[in-house]
Amino acid sequence: MRVGRLGVARPTIRANNAVILFWVGPYRMAIDAGALQEIRNGRDFAAGESRCKATLSAHALLGVPPGPQERLLVLRLGSVGVRVDRVERMIETGALLPLPKAFQGAERGWYCGITLAGESVIPIVNPETFAREAYAPGPTIPASEWPPPDQSREAVAS
């Protein structure tokens, strides 16, 4: 294809990313599918069956009121389990966009960017933040002592 006198136009390179959509309270988020080892049903297995060295509640990390936490996202990085309310589906998105300036403070560490899915803007969580927080000093929950699904990390710590 020729474009005027300047030469040949190059096709647009579009990066496709596979992400898993999940919910934490009323918020829909995504995580890179390559960052996950597996997705488990949080109610139907004993803690010893998972290969998690540590687990944390996404509600506690993100400051969202406790919810049902019915799914466990097992990250490849650090063998960390992250409890979320539900997993929606896996989608393929376009390029990862930088975070808008409206994201301030700790939020800039929680997310590595945003993506568009149809007409929705979805934040992409940073799996390294989950791994770092799971091993941070403070109230962590060993996999063998997981609380019932309706309790968050703060409820167990007190």
Image (cartoon, grey):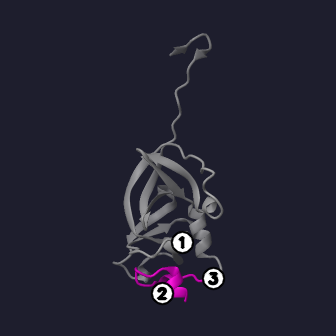
Q: Which mark is residue 63?
A: 1
Residue at 48% from the left image edge and 80% from the top image edge: 152
- Residue under the point 60% across and 72% down: 133
* Marks 3 and 1, the one that precedes in the sequence: 1
Specify which label sits upstream in the sequence, 2 or 1: 1
Identify residue type, mark 1: Gly
Q: Amino acid at mark 3?
A: Gly
Q: Residue at x 45, y 76 (%)?
A: 66
For numbered disc 2, what is the local secondary structure? helix
Compared to residue 89, the image places residue 155 above or below, namely below
How far is the residue under mark 3 from the one under mark 1? Answer: 16 Å
Question: Which numbered disc, 2 or 1, marks the residue closer to the eye?
Answer: 1
Q: Which residue is mark 2?
A: 145
Q: Which residue is mark 3?
A: 138
Residue positioned most to the bottom: 158
- Image x and y of residue 147, in percent: 45, 85
The amino acid type of the residue labelled 2 equals Glu
Foreground residue among 23 and 49: 23
Mark 2 and 3 residues: CB-CB less than 8 Å, in contact? Answer: no
Residue 90's image quarter? bottom left
Q: Secondary structure at mark 3?
A: loop
Q: CA distance from mark 2 to mark 3?
A: 15 Å
- The Cα atoms of the two marked residues, 2 and 1, are separated by 22 Å
Region of the chain picked out in magenta, as a range: 138-158
Q: Position of residue 1 (x, y in %)?
A: 50, 16
Which quarter shows the C terminus?
bottom right
Q: Residue 63, image x and y in percent?
A: 54, 71
Front residue (pair 40, 111): 111
Q: Nearer the viewer, mark 3 or mark 1?
A: 1
Give the residue at the far left of this rendering: 44
Magenta: main secondary structure: loop
